[in-house]
Each structure stands twice: as structure tokens, then as C-alpha cells.
Amino acid sequence: MLFWDQRALESTIVSAAEHGLQTAQHAMGNAAIAQATRALRAVGDRLDNLPGRPRLEHTLFCGPNLATRIADVGAIAVVSPIWLDELGESFRGAASLVPDLPPIPMRTLAAAGVTLAGASDYPSADYAVLPAIQAAVTRRIASDGTLCSPEEAVTAEEAFRAYTMGSAAALGVDDIAGSIAVGKQADLVILDKNPLEVEPGSIGSIRVLRTYVAGKLVHGDRTIVG
């Protein structure tokens, strides 16, 4: 179901650009994603100097052709893989009806060159990042342990990139955050295990020992060693 007239949508995006505002379109299904990419193509380079690239929120059902269109207009796909864990049964039913449109198609989007940004969409699902990364990697439904479109799984490294550098890009702050580098804000966590080395199904149970924001400890025990 579409809520916008195409011309009205394009006019609104142009108005946002003229006011220096980043645009974010709520686009869950393939029809909404197609409309969103048409609008972004129509407004052209008028969004190039905004503080962040245009965002498509959720991109829930999307095939390869649409993924390529998202990449072509330079939009960022904001995805919520935690939904697989908590709402996977509903998505699995939808996937059986439209097998060419897998839910939360992170692999398809990444293969097309789309920047992925991890999000929770809280309170629709839990905001914890590590369980969301586990869901992106395993595609396992919590209620019954079955898999939902496993071909759309990404690696742990790709999932972490979505929740760090990808999210920073979606917010337009990737020049100061999203990665650990000289000159960037020191926002980081210390975990009790290396998430790139553990079994994927245990990523969600990794403990956060410390959290730093701008280099200052805001969570955890200062006495932790090793």
C-alpha cells in the first residue's frame, strides 16, 4: 500500500533538500521501495550536499533489481535483522508466498553495493545490538529454531559494519564516528569474547564489559583487566 502520490513525494524531498534536511523514506515493500527510488532519481543531485545520504527505512521485501536501483541512487538501506529473531514466523509465511522477495534481504542488498545500516526500530523489537547481529548471521527464528531465507545471511563482519560504519553513514556522522581511527570520536565497547571468532549462534550472549562514549567510560567496571 502506497501513501504518497509520486509528484507530491518528489516535491517533498526537494523541499527537504532546500532546507538542508536529510531524507528518510519509510519503504517496507517492493512497491514502496520502487516509488522511493523513482523519487530519488527524479530529484537527482539536489541531495548530494546534505549532511547524510538519503535513507530507506526497513527495505523489508526487495529483490536484486530493486537492490540495484537503491545502489544506483546512492540510498542507504536501514535494516532491522532483530525482526528475524522476534517476528520471523510472520516473515517466513510471507516468503513462502513471494519467494523472489525474501524478507530483510541483507545479502541481496550488500551484493548490489548498497550500504547497510543496522537499526532496531524499537519498540517493535529489542534494541540490543549483539542479538540483532546474531540474527543477521544465522537467520534463525527464536520461537522454533528454524531458518528464514538463510541465503540472505551475511557474515559477522558485515553485520558489525552495518551497526557501526553503516549506521554512522546513515546519520551523516561517518566522518567522526562509526570506526576506530585517529581524529574520530572514541565511541567503543569492550566485549568478553571476539564476535568474529565465536560460533554465530552465541554472538547474542557475548557480554559488554565496558562502554566508552567520546573516550569516557559510561558503563562497566574500571577494574576489569585482560
Image (cartoon, grey):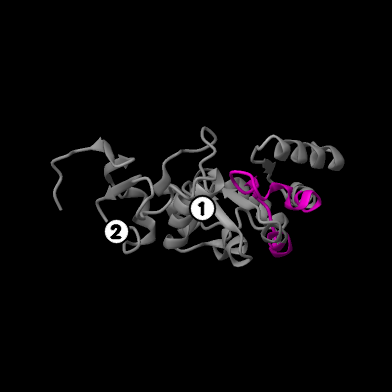
Secondary structure type for disc 2 = loop
- Residue under the point 36% across and 55% down: 181
Comparing 155 with 13, the one in front is 13
Task: Tell me the residue that label 2 is attached to.
Answer: 194
The tag on residue 181 is none
Q: Position of residue 223 (x, y in %)?
A: 13, 41
- Residue under the point 70% across and 63% down: 68
- Asked if residue 103 lies left or right of residue 171, the reply is right
Q: Amino acid at mark 2?
A: Asn
> Label 1: how many residues lie within 10 Å, few (<14), some (14-19) or many (20+)?
many
Q: Is residue 63 magenta?
A: yes
> Label 2: how many residues lie within 10 Å, few (<14), some (14-19) or many (20+)?
few
Asked whether the viewer can see residue 158, the reply is yes
**Measured Cα–Cα span from mark 2 to mark 1:** 20 Å
**Quadrant in which the N terminus is drawn:** top right
Q: Position of residue 73 (x, y in %)?
A: 71, 56
- Residue under the point 50% across and 62% down: 154
Q: Position of residue 133 (x, y in %)?
A: 44, 52
- Residue under the point 77% across and 40% down: 14
Relative vertical location of residue 7 with respect to residue 174 in this rendering, above or below:
above
The segment highlighted magenta reads: 40-68
Comparing 163 with 156, the one in front is 163
Asked whether the viewer can see residue 140, the reply is no
- Asked if residue 44 lies left or right of residue 123, the reply is right
Relative vertical location of residue 70 with respect to residue 151 in this rendering, above or below:
above
Q: Position of residue 15 (x, y in %)?
A: 76, 36
Q: Are marks 2 and 1 in contact (CB under 8 Å)?
A: no
Task: Tell me the residue that label 1 is attached to.
Answer: 166
Secondary structure type for disc 1 = helix
Q: Is residue 16 magenta?
A: no
